[in-house]
Amino acid sequence: MGSRDDSQVPALPDSPAAPATPTSLGELLPDGLVVVGGDGLIRFVNREACRILRCEVDHLLGHPAVQALPLADKFGSDWWQQTDPWTPPSGRTRRREKLLVGPDGRDVLVTARYVRTAEGRVERVLVGLRDAEARLRAERDQATVLSTVAHELRAPLTSVTGFTSSLLRRWDRFTDEQKRLMIETIEADASRLTRLITELLDISRLDSHNLSLRLAPLNLEELLSAHVSRHELSRTAGQVVLSLGPMAQERGLPEVWADADRLQQVFFNLIENALRHGEPPVTVTLDVDGPGHEWILVRVDDEGNGVPEGDREKVFGRFWRGSDGSTTGLGLYVVRGLVEAHGGTVTVETAPAGGARFAVRLPGGVPDAVALR
């Protein structure tokens, strides 16, 4: 057995010409690696393993693995005792990945590979370690997705099935006004379901970097005017107001290439968010920005309570639902993803009236990919 000084975590080679050793290669691994000798003593630990286990290399090297690296399953059973690679007879060469509890009580993903001699004796045990936090967080997010989707689908589906069932069975008993109201409710709930499904599909595309845009010249003022008109048809007139900023009035708006459907989705979500969480009127201001006025700036202001400074980054996260929990928490996440896909930015700050201001900046001009065609 080498001295403790010889077993320290080695430095990486100083130059590309430096010979690669097993220990230096071990340092290049993205996962934690602990090498245990045939005598049960720990012979090598890479830096990633020390980070995952949150301990110094001296606490592990040269010590018995069973004592220095205690690992247990969720029931408290000792992993080393369960696997016991040193007790013959056994022809096993590996252990599949398992979620275990590490020395400090944190979850860690562990795999093992046994290096055996020709006679079958274990010469080395290579223990692979992965931080389980990211995977557990992903599993929690997935559970949140399922719970959120189930909850959000249930209410409109219940309404749709209830009203359609009533209309089918008792059509003659309802007045024309009652029928109209029920059909309008069915249409509204069906639209709500469509938006939810669209947002879920967009989240999947954004997370997998698989979102495609159909870029074309777009008159943003016309697009926003159409949004305001639609809101006035479904709500009290004057709740949403569109105006041009001073620089836009003076210089006009630069040409913008964008996916019209995606930007409609962005501004629908922002205006709906302002109407739901703020106080009317909601003011949508279209202006230009940047030293050369090459950016288009769209501000959506409400007169509500605003967004606390500590929550301004959180509002764009997946499933952030605020204090009232009245929304899916998907809309603003999709807004940021779609705006950034266009090369723009979206931020939230305090509006002049004290409410929330969501500011979307989009690049003007012809995109490079289009200009080079």
Image (tube, rainbow, N blue to C red):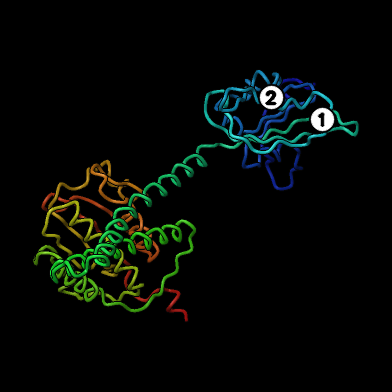
Mark 1 lies on residue: 90
Q: Residue at x 34, y 59 (%)?
A: 196
In this rendering, position of residue 280 left or right of residue 186: left
Q: Residue at x 35, y 75 (%)?
A: 257
**Label 1 Cα crowd, 10 Å radius (few <14 / some 14-19 / many 20+):** few
CA separation, marks 2 and 1? 15 Å
In front: mark 2 or mark 1? 1
User: Where 137 sits versus 72, above or below?
Assistant: below
Q: Are marks 2 and 1 in contact (CB under 8 Å)?
A: no
Occupied quadrant, residue 230: bottom left
From this viewpoint, which residue is outermost toward the right? 119
Q: Position of residue 143 (x, y in %)?
A: 44, 44
Q: Nearer the viewer, residue 42 or 297?
A: 42
At label 1, which amino acid type do we have? Ser
At label 2, which amino acid type do we have? Trp
Q: Secondary structure at mark 2?
A: helix
User: Where 329 sits versus 229, above or below?
Assistant: above
Mark 2 lies on residue: 80
Q: Residue at x 27, y 75 (%)?
A: 254
Residue 287 seen: no
Q: Nearer the viewer, residue 171 or 204?
A: 171
User: Where 153 sits versus 81, above or below?
Assistant: below
- Mark closest to the chain's N terminus, 2 or 1: 2
Q: Which mark is residue 178?
A: none
Occupied quadrant, residue 74: top right
Q: Nearer the viewer, residue 205 or 42?
A: 205
Q: Position of residue 371 (x, y in %)?
A: 42, 79
Q: Position of residue 228 (x, y in %)?
A: 17, 69
Q: Position of residue 29 (x, y in %)?
A: 65, 41
User: In the rendered view of the protein, which quadrant contains the N terminus?
Assistant: top right
Residue 359 seen: yes
**Label 2 Cα crowd, 10 Å radius (few <14 / some 14-19 / many 20+):** some
